[in-house]
Image (cartoon, grey):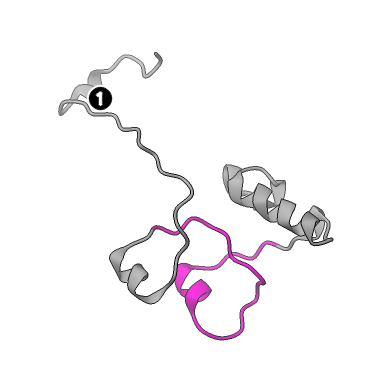
Amino acid sequence: MKDDAPESGKGFEAAVSCAGAGETGFAADGVVWVRSSFEEAIRPGAKNFDGNMRQYSITPERDEVVDLSAHFYSAAMAVLVSPGAIDTAPTFAP
């Protein structure tokens, strides 16, 4: 979500949620955003939300107790530098 503000509709999860609401006949401004922890989201029982779309890291422990969807984004980029090099770099610009 862009700027941690799902109500803006900006960012992947927010945009998909708003589009899903529209496809089912609900206006995007009628979507109520509820924050929950991982534990709250997977706990059995009634919830105070209808759907949960967010980025949860898949850990071996979580994979044992929850059926998580395949990840939709994988960042293959990395920056490797020698120790201390980042302290002396004049800029990160290309």
- Find residue 79 and report its horizontal and vertical position in percent: 29, 29
In the displayed structure, does residue 19 sit left or right of residue 69?
right
The location of residue 90, given as percent across then percent down, is 31, 14
Residue at which label 1 appears: 86
**On-image quarter of the C terminus:** top left
Q: Which amino acid does label 1 sit on?
A: Ile
Quadrant of the image occupied by residue 84 = top left
Quick one: 69 or 90, which is closer to the camera? 69
User: Is 25 above or below relative to 85?
Assistant: below
Given the current orientation, which residue lies at the most extreme front position? 70
Q: Is the magenta stretch mostly helix, strand or loop?
A: loop
Q: Relative to residue 13, is residue 61 depicted above or below?
A: below
Question: Is the residue marked by circle 1 packed among few (<14), some (14-19), or many (20+) residues within 10 Å?
Answer: few
Residue at 66 percent of width and 43 percent of height: 10
Q: Residue 82 at x, y = what percent? A: 16, 26
Frontmost residue, 49 versus 91: 49
Residues in magenta? 33-57
